[in-house]
């Protein structure tokens, strides 16, 4: 573009400049026409070739990426040659322009000089004619005076006066004459136009006198410049013989011409400011000179070569020489004045002559320079463009391969589509693989077909607005062949596909990213929803102590809008005082510790206590990059705690009271038990003892009935003793201190049954005790418990031929359930609830001995261990007592 | 051969009678001294108060000591006896109705040589007293009278 503009500008300058130049040149119309034609042809030629080159260069540049390798080689070859061609063409153009200019200048100069020569010749001719005229007029005047003198009476008294008048009258007809005077044959002036009478001086030595005296046929004599002997002025004397009627020599008539006046004769001739005109005698004596220089008048120019070499051969001629007077170079012409011993020389100053030419040359030169420069510029531009293309094409063979590789093997789907028809022009392998369409599919598809129909309007809008020179980056949804919709980001580049204007599209599947982003957004929203609805303060502060996240609770607690937190520092928001108070915690959390503190929430609208937790957030490098602030309101809890504290104090007081009461009661119970064991037994012992004594000492008096009564008394008292013992045992179970340690129930049961066997070795029993039953319980109580249960089993199976007693454990609902099972008398389940009460018996003492305390004791022991006990049974089948020990 | 004396410390008259009957029935000892409270028992043992001047020959071979006694209880009697040089090694059998562990423990730690619970069944009581007398009076070798040698 720039090149074209520059070309137009310089072209216009060149056209206009040369036209102006041609106008200025004083050449004929034919030559102008020839020039114009040549120039026009040249212009057309240059324009056409430049256009051709420019178009070629442009086409090559745009086609570059996808030309075939053969084309590449051709282009490469062409480019190198083209550069030389362009440079050569430029050089030829420049050389031609310079040659034309040089020729022009040279020929113009020659022409100018020739015309100046012709000019001087013409001028010389004119000056010769004028000079001739002047001198002829003078000759005629002198001849006329001679004739007139003959007519004047030689003796008349007024003769002198009349001659004087004659002379004056004749002088007036001589425009350059200063005087006319007549000298007699002795050389004495006798008449003078400027003096009456004439001053008598001797002029007999003057050449104008002697030449006439000595040669009667001499005719007109022109003297070298002389000095007037009477007046002292410089003059050129022109003399003629004064003859008498008989033709005898009377003297000479002389006309004095002033050289300066003669010079004035030539003033009317245009010789420029530095031209010169000289009037010389043939011997070289200068008579007059324009411009007039007094000192050179009368000097000899006889050393001038033209006088010596040329004049003898030719009456007229041209020469070039330095001016004798002023040393200026001139082009001069000389001419001998016909019939007179005079030579006129006209010289025009060479510089002056050439000044027009010089001026024209300068204009011409400038125009040419402009032309040359523009050619150089264009050539440089073209060469640069070609060079660049050359560089491009040099790597094209290799890069072509790379491009194809990049295109085909690119991990991203790439395709080219026609911007007009939207048809796919080319697709790469990844596009085929990713989208599922075959290449044949793509060939028949447009880019519309890979989009969900809902996106078509947007696509068409996009195509309409596309700027064909620019890259576009945009996000789209694409549809694969299987109907999957994916999110993509595309880069679309302008592309020339042959002569079609197309776009190259590079797509990247960002579905996952989009999903991730959406998930992130959703999760952020969820976070926001959750945190805003949690009745706790939740925030995030970065390591520069700037709030990054706060939930709504901040607003509720502190009355500061959420937006006012984000990006501001804690110091700004909570103020210097609270900042200093929380600083130890902030420092700790920034050092990587989780800090929890309960304190008043400073600056809260209402008085509020909160439990603050500061949890550090570690970056990937393990450094703390921020921390979470979490706080929940503990104002209510604090109040409740205070209330609880008060209650506790009250409760402790009451417990102490109750404990004291309980201890007192316990002490009473102790005393009671002691009394029971000690004092209730004593009377029984007495009853029994004295009954025995009666039986021993008074047997004969008692008789059988008395004996029986005493036996009954004794049985009753002994039974009561047993009852007391059992009650005491039951009481001890309740009162004794308890220590829970691991207890091996299997071992204890083994010992008990061993004792039972030893007591009644005749009984046939199957006793099965599950091994390794270890539980956490009080060992003494466990022994009492098992004693009672096994005693019972032993007792109630006493009527079985084969007694079976089993101690085992099952797990039920995660609890260990222990049981003692026997095949004894059993019981009716209707009375199952009565089994564990004190003194409750389901059998008579006659059937099975017992006090009815055993299972009550078992119940107590189990209860003391926080467990429970129950029984299952059937009359005459057996009974099972289950118990669970908590803990 | 020394006189075998039993000191029975018993506040209950019935028990006293029954015990004495049992001792008698077994023909255990020639002499049984009965103290009806702890204070009397100590006076007898240390030959003080009412028993000042009691001869050494009447030192008991064994003391049958009830625990629940008026004035000074059995444990206290035992403890004092064990601190006194005269009775330091004297065999003391606790004979009581109590079967409380606490009582048994206290008795032994206070220096009791034996602990026997009085059974309600008089036959068993008789047997117990008989065994007791047989053991402590006949089988057991009494400790030497240490205080005389020192």
Image (cartoon, coloured by chain):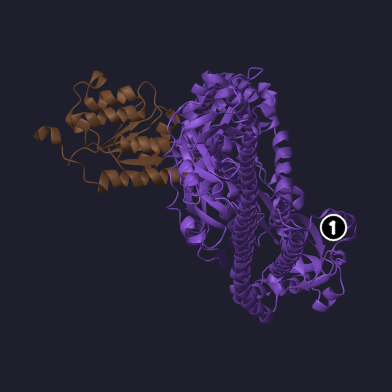
Chain colours: A purple, B brown
Placement of A768 over or under A462, stated as above or below:
below
Chain designation of label 1: A
Quadrant housing residue A578: top right
Label 1 sits on a secondary structure element that is helix
Q: Which residue is identified by label 1?
A: A463
x then y, percent, for residue A525: 73, 42
In this rendered view, identify the residue nearer to me: A765 or A711: A765
x then y, percent, for residue A764: 56, 68
In this rendered view, identify the residue nearer to me: B22 or A111: A111
Residue farthest to the left, as pictured? B149
Can residue A518 be seen?
A: yes
Residue farthest to the bottom, as pictured? A70
Quadrant housing residue A637: top right
Placement of A433 over or under A275, stated as above or below:
below
x then y, percent, for residue A791: 56, 54
x then y, percent, for residue A733: 53, 40
Residue B95 lies left or right of residue A271; in this view the side is: left
Residue B8 lies left or right of residue A597; in this view the side is: left
Placement of A62 over or under A731, stated as above or below:
below
Q: How many marks?
A: 1
Placement of A764 over or under B33, stated as above or below:
below
For disc 1, the neighbor class at 10 Å (few under 14, some 14 to 19, many from 20) is some
In this rendered view, identify the residue nearer to me: A510 or A209: A209
Can residue A696 be seen?
A: no
Name the quadrant of the N terminus of chain A. Answer: bottom right
């Amino acid at each position: 573009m720039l090149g074209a503009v520059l070309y137009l500008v310089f072209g216009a300058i060149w056209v206009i400049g040369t036209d102006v130049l041609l106008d200025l040149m004083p050449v004929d119309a034919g030559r102008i026409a020839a020039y114009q034609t040549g120039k026009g042809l040249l212009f057309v030629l240059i324009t056409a070739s430049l256009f051709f080159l420019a178009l070629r260069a442009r086409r090559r540049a745009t086609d570059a990426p996808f030309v075939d390798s053969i084309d590449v080689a051709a282009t490469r070859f062409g480019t190198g040659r083209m550069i030389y061609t362009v440079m050569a063409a430029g050089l030829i153009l420049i050389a031609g322009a310079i040659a034309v200019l040089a020729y022009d200048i040279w020929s113009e100069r020659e022409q100018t000089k020739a015309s100046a020569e012709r000019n001087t010749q013409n001028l010389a001719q004119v000056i010769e004619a004028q000079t001739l005229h002047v001198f002829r007029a003078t000759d005629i005047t002198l001849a006329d005076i001679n004739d007139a003198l003959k007519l004047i009476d030689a003796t008349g008294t007024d003769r002198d006066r009349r001659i004087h008048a004659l002379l004056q009258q004749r002088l007036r007809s001589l425009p350059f004459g200063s005087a006319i005077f007549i000298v007699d044959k002795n050389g004495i002036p006798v008449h003078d136009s400027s003096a009456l009478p004439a001053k008598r001086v001797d002029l007999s030595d003057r050449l104008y006198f002697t030449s006439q005296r000595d040669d009667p046929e001499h005719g007109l004599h022109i003297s070298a410049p002389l000095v007037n002997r009477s007046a002292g002025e410089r003059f050129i004397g022109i003399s003629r013989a004064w003859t008498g009627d008989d033709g005898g020599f009377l003297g000479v008539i002389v006309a004095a011409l002033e050289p300066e006046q003669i010079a004035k004769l030539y003033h009317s001739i245009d010789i420029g400011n530095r031209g010169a005109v000289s009037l010389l005698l043939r011997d070289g004596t200068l008579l007059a000179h324009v411009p007039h220089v007094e000192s050179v008048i009368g000097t000899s120019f006889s050393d001038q070569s033209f006088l010596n070499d040329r004049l003898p051969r030719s009456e007229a001629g041209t020469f070039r020489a330095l001016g004798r007077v002023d040393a200026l170079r001139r082009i001069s012409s000389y001419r001998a004045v016909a019939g007179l011993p005079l030579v006129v020389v006209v010289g025009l100053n060479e510089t002056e002559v050439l000044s027009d030419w010089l001026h024209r040359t300068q204009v011409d030169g400038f125009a040419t320079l402009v032309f040359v420069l523009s050619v150089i510029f264009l050539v440089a531009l073209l060469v640069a463009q070609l060079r660049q293309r050359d560089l491009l094409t040099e790597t094209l063979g290799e890069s072509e391969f790379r491009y194809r590789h990049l295109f085909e093997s690119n991990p991203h789907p790439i395709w080219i589509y026609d911007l007009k028809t939207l048809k796919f022009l080319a697709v790469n392998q990844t596009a085929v693989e990713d989208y599922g369409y075959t290449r044949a599919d793509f060939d028949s598809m447009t880019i519309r077909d890979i989009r969900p129909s809902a996106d078509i309007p947007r696509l068409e809008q996009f195509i309409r607005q596309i700027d064909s020179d620019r890259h576009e980056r945009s996000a789209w949804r694409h549809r694969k062949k299987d109907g999957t919709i994916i999110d993509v980001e595309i880069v679309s580049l302008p592309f020339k596909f042959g002569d079609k204007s197309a776009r190259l599209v590079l797509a990247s599947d960002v579905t996952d990213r989009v999903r991730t982003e959406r998930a992130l957004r959703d999760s952020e929203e969820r976070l926001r929803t959750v945190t805003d609805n949690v009745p706790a303060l939740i925030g995030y502060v970065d390591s520069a102590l700037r709030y990054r996240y706060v939930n709504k609770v901040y607003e509720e607690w502190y009355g500061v809008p959420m937006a006012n937190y984000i990006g501001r520092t804690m110091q700004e928001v909570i103020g210097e005082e609270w900042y200093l108070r929380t600083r130890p915690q902030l420092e700790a959390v920034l050092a990587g510790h989780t800090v929890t503190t309960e304190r008043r929430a400073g600056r809260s609208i209402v008085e509020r206590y909160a439990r603050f937790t500061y949890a550090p957030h570690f970056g990937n490098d393990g450094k703390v990059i921020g921390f979470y602030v979490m706080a929940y309101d503990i104002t209510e809890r604090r109040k409740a705690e205070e209330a609880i504290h008060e209650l506790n104090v009250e409760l402790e007081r009451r417990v102490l009271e109750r404990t004291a009461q309980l201890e007192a009661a316990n002490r009473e119970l102790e005393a009671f038990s002691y009394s029971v064991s000690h004092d209730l037994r004593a009377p029984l012992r007495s009853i029994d003892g004295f009954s025995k004594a009666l039986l021993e000492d008074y047997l004969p008096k008692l008789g059988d009935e008395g004996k029986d009564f005493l036996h009954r008394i004794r049985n009753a008292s002994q039974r009561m003793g047993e009852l007391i013992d059992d009650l005491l045992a039951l009481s001890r179970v309740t009162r004794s201190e308890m220590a829970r340690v691991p207890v091996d129930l299997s071992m204890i049961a083994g010992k008990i049954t061993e004792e039972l066997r030893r007591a009644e070795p005749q009984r046939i029993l199957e006793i099965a005790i599950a091994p390794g039953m270890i539980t956490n319980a009080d060992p003494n109580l466990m022994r009492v418990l098992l004693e009672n249960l096994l005693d019972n089993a032993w007792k109630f199976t006493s009527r079985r031929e084969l007694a079976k007693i089993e101690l085992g454990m099952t797990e039920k609902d995660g609890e260990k359930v222990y049981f003692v099972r026997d095949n004894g008398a059993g019981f009716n389940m209707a009375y199952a609830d009565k089994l564990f009460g004190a003194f409750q018996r389901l059998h008579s003492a006659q059937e099975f001995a017992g006090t009815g305390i055993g299972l009550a004791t078992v119940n107590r022991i189990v209860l003391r261990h926080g467990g429970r006990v129950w029984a299952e049974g059937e009359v005459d089948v057996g009974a099972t007592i289950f118990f669970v020990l908590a803990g | 051969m020394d006189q075998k004396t039993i000191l029975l410390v018993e506040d209950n008259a019935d028990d006293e009678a029954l015990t004495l009957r049992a001792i008698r029935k077994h023909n255990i000892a020639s002499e049984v001294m009965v103290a009806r409270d702890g204070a009397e028992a100590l006076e007898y043992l240390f030959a003080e108060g009412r028993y000042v001047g009691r001869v050494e020959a009447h030192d008991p071979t064994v003391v049958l000591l009830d625990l629940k006694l008026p004035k000074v209880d059995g444990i206290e009697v035992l403890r004092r006896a064990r601190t006194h040089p005269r009775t330091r090694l004297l065999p003391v059998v606790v004979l009581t109705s109590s079967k409380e562990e606490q009582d048994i423990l206290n008795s032994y730690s206070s220096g009791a040589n034996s602990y026997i619970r009085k059974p309600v069944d008089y036959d068993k009581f008789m047997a117990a007293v008989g065994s007791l007398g047989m053991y402590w009076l006949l089988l057991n070798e009494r400790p030497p009278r240490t205080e005389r040698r020192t």
